[in-house]
Image (cartoon, grey):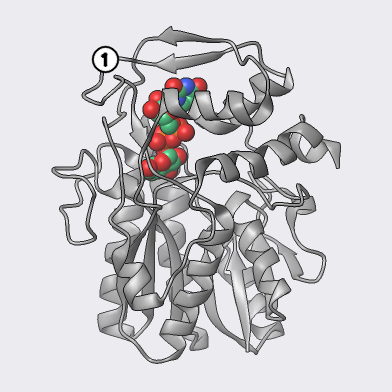
Amino acid sequence: MAILVLGGAGYIGSHTVDRLVDRGVDVVVVDSLVTGHRAAVNSKAKFYQGDIADQPFMRDVFKENPAIDAVIHFAAFSLVAESMKKPLKYFDNNTSGMIKLLEVMNEVGVKKIVFSSTAATYGIPEQVPIKESDPQQPINPYGESKLMMEKIMRWSDQAYGIKFIALRYFNVAGAKPDGSIGEDHNPETHLLPIVLQVAAGTREKLQIFGDDYDTPDGTNVRDYVHPFDLADAHILAVDYLRQGHDSTAFNLGSSTGFSNMEILKAAREVTGKPIPAELAPRRPGDPDTLIAASDKARKVLGWKPQFDDIHKIIETAWKWHATHPNGYQDR
Ligand code: UFG
């Protein structure tokens, strides 16, 4: 049996491929390299460059690799701010890409998919921690595109029997502990990599977007999870589908919240650098607090995240950033 990883050259995809290869799993990767990095893909995985919406290309990938019985899907655009300006780019690539993919999966008879969903499908939570059964009311096209993908999978399960697991990630941070793969976005918009770019001297200072939120120190509170722990959850989710279980969704977070100021303080402690920061206006669309209730994944999948300490998560990210200040260009 082999697993097809779509978007396996991206940040979370590449860590999952690495983890799968480590466990001796046969891995086939498809990535368009629009945002991913070829150098991030473990050399033991079979790599194809192409777009998942290109059906003739995808048919060939399945035909050349008949051992594929399950798909893990990371191949989506994921910048909230960009999605506000270019919503059609998100509905085209993410949502319509999913339709094209499911059509081919149905044709070739591959009926298991584990999907990277997001906490952004919940919008502004009515309560924290957020449960899987809470209302999904996205407040940006990115979250909407992923919620639509979840719904499309639900109906495809009913009609064609394609079973799915939607994994709704909270804030992903950290890198492979040996520092060989990590986070490299262009442009970078996420808090921790920006903090560490300032620490590494490739960015002048951090701007903290708002300190008047309804949180203990006024800055947003987020729930951070390491990509290796996410990778393990994907592997467990594939096993769960292989055991014949029904489609469902899981939140993936550490169930602990850290404010933006707490992340800055922890990063100063880990790096020993001053990391200059200034207050800036709020960024549109930021909910006060996002914390996952992730007991369902722990109970049902047996998920046991290893990185439960924010200092440890930051240490892994720092090892990557300090040795690759320009990301994969430095490899
Ligand atoms: N932030 C700053 N300064 C920066 C960058 C970010 O203060 O330069 C703040 C943001 O305003 C926010 C927090 O840091 O309060 C975290 O922001 P990120 O951009 O790192 O992450 P988000 O919480 O916006 O989004 C991430 C993923 C989404 C996912 C969401 C769910 O990118 O895909 O987590 O928790 F939906």
* Left or right: residue 45 compared with residue 198: right
Task: Please name whichever residue, 186 or 42, is drawn nearer the observer in this view of the structure.
Answer: 42
Residue drawn at x 53%, y 30% is 266
* Relative to 330, 151 lies left or right: left
Query: Visible in this render: residue 187?
Result: no
Residue at the (45%, 81%) spot, across then down: 112
Where does ligand 1 appear, by image quarter? top left
Q: State the SS at label 1.
A: loop
The picture places residue 69, in percent across and down from the top left corner, at: 55, 86
Q: Nearer the viewer, residue 326 or 201?
A: 201
Say which residue appears at 48% left-offset and 62% top-offset.
Answer: 305
- In front: 195, or 185? 195
Residue 211 seen in render: yes
Q: Quadrant of the N terminus?
A: bottom right
Toward which corner of the image does residue 148 lie, by quadrant? bottom left
Q: Which residue is mark 1?
A: 212
Place residue 156 in its image quadrant: bottom left
- Viewer-closest of 146 and 207: 207
The amino acid sitting under disc 1 is Asp
Quadrant position of residue 65: bottom right
Up-down relation of residue 27 to residue 88 (above or below):
below
Q: Residue 10: where, in percent of width, then height?
A: 63, 51
Q: Residue furthest right?
A: 331
Q: Quadrant of the C terminus?
A: top right
The 10 Å Cα crowd at callout 1, few under 14, some 14 to 19, many 20 or more, is some
Task: Please give left or right for residue 59 compared with residue 100 in the image.
Answer: right
Q: Position of residue 296 (x, y in %)?
A: 29, 68
The residue that appears at 18% across and 61% down in the rendered structure is 133
